[in-house]
Image (tube, helix red, strand yellow):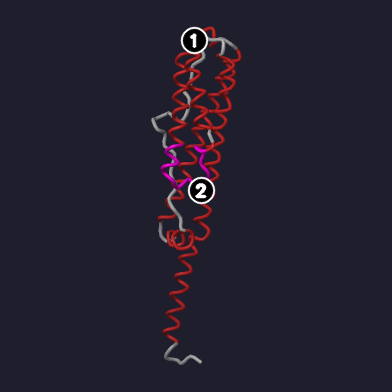
Amino acid sequence: MFSRQNFPQLARFATVAFASLALTACGINSVPAAEENAKAKWADVQAAFQERANLIPNLQEITMSSAEQERETLEGVIQARASATRPEIQLSTEDLDDPARMAAFQQAQGELGGALARLMVTVEQYPELRSQDNFGRFMTQLEGSENRIRVAIRDYNEAVRQYNTTIRTFPDTIGANIIHGAEPMVPYEAVTQGAEVAPTLDMRSGE
């Protein structure tokens, strides 16, 4: 049996324990919810980049009969695509807290975007190619892909911001550190501004 003298001590202990549990519980649900949201948004980023990569074979077919200079530039696009889509460069959701892995992914995507930009500048010199229906359809698809990449990256970065804020903000930071061992996620930053997307080509130019 507990004596009356021990009751205040036990009451204080129970109060502290309850308060600690309550504070920790604040991060039990909020931290994994924010993490899963960011991971879902990253899946959208990968899907958007993959969609752009899937367009490249169509571009290759369109430009095969073009001038030698353009074919050389196309070869750069093909090589950049191969680099950007190789398995070891892809990020799993477990890699989103690894700055080095994210930097490698960003670099590969930036190189592909730059190669596409150079090809589009070369294409400007060939009005007969721009006038082809299949090239016009390709550009429409590419522009749509660009927009989806922009939106996916914006949404991912916002989800990362919310997650990183959650794990650093009291009282959620208690649960983040004690229970989840949470680490900050890395936002997506283009290697050079606009490098994460191919350029928009005005199909009406030169008319």
Q: Nearer the viewer, residue 34 or 89?
A: 89
Give the Cα distance between marks 1 and 2: 43 Å
User: Which residue is denoted by mark 1 in the rendering?
Assistant: 68
Find the magenta span and give its range: 88-104
Q: Is residue 146 above or below residue 29?
A: above
Which residue type does callout 1 highlight?
Glu
* Sequence-earlier tag: 1 or 2: 1
Q: Is residue 95 above or below residue 11?
A: above
Q: Residue at x 45, y 82 (%)?
A: 11
User: Which residue is denoted by mark 2 in the rendering?
Assistant: 94
Q: Nearer the viewer, residue 55 or 139?
A: 55
Element marked by disc 2:
helix
Per the image, is 27 magenta? no
Q: How far across and how far down the image is residue 155, in percent?
A: 50, 40
Q: Mark 1 near mark 2, Cβ–Cβ under 8 Å?
A: no
In the figure, is residue 8 to the left or right of 127?
left
Q: How far across and how far down the image is residue 23, in percent?
A: 45, 66
Q: Residue at x 49, y 30 (%)?
A: 83
Mark 2 burial class by Cα count in 10 Å: few <14, some 14-19, many 20+: few
Per the image, is 101 magenta? yes
| Magenta segment main secondary structure | helix
Which residue type does callout 2 highlight?
Glu
In the figure, is residue 20 to the left or right of 148?
left
Mark 1 burial class by Cα count in 10 Å: few <14, some 14-19, many 20+: few
